[in-house]
Image (tube, rainbow, N blue to C red):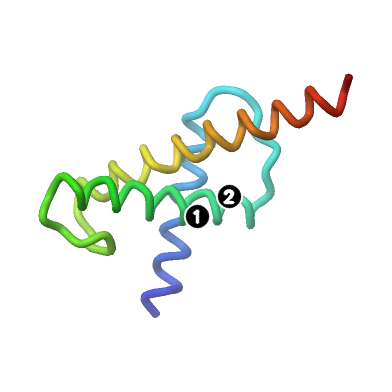
Amino acid sequence: MHIVLFLIFGLVIGLLARAIMPGRQAMNIPMTLVLGVVGSYLGGFLVALVTKKRVTDFNTAGLIGSLIGALLVLFIYERVVASRRAKAGR
């Protein structure tokens, strides 16, 4: 059951990150889920470095860190995809 909740949380975080990030992201729902899960893990890892919480703990700092992590992953993803599209269009 924890895995299902983690996936739902990842989807919500991914959707929030896409709503906050300006511009149009060409992602489907599974990619949004992956974005949220990877961002949540990255944010949880960064929060765990600063605090004494575990990566998988559920707390306010982890929520904010998850969203920041997802925004960071989305930013990097968009830069990689945009550069590939620009190279393919030449």
Residue, disc 1: 11
Quarter-of-image position of residue 41: bottom left
How many numbered badges does the structure rendering display? Answer: 2
- Name, please, the residue furthest toward the top: 90
Amino acid tagged 2: Thr
- Image quadrant for the N terminus? bottom left
Query: Label 2 neighbourhood size at 10 Å, few (<14), some (14-19), many (20+)?
Result: many
Residue 46 picture location, percent across and down: 27, 46
For the point 71% across and 26% down, which residue is it?
83
For the point 55% across and 55% down, which residue is it?
34
In front here: 31 or 11? 31
The reply to whether discs 1 and 2 touch (Cβ–Cβ < 8 Å) is yes
Residue 85 picture location, percent across and down: 78, 29
Secondary structure of residue under mark 1 = helix
* Residue 54 numbered tag: none
Residue, disc 2: 32
Quarter-of-image position of residue 27: top right
Residue 31 picture location, percent across and down: 63, 52
Amino acid tagged 1: Leu
For the point 53% across and 49% down, which residue is it?
35
74 up-or-down from 2: above or below: above
62 up-or-down from 67: above or below: below
Label 1 vs 2, first from the N-terminus: 1
* 68 left or right of 71 in image: left
Secondary structure of residue under mark 2 = helix
79 up-or-down from 43: above or below: above
15 up-or-down from 9: above or below: above
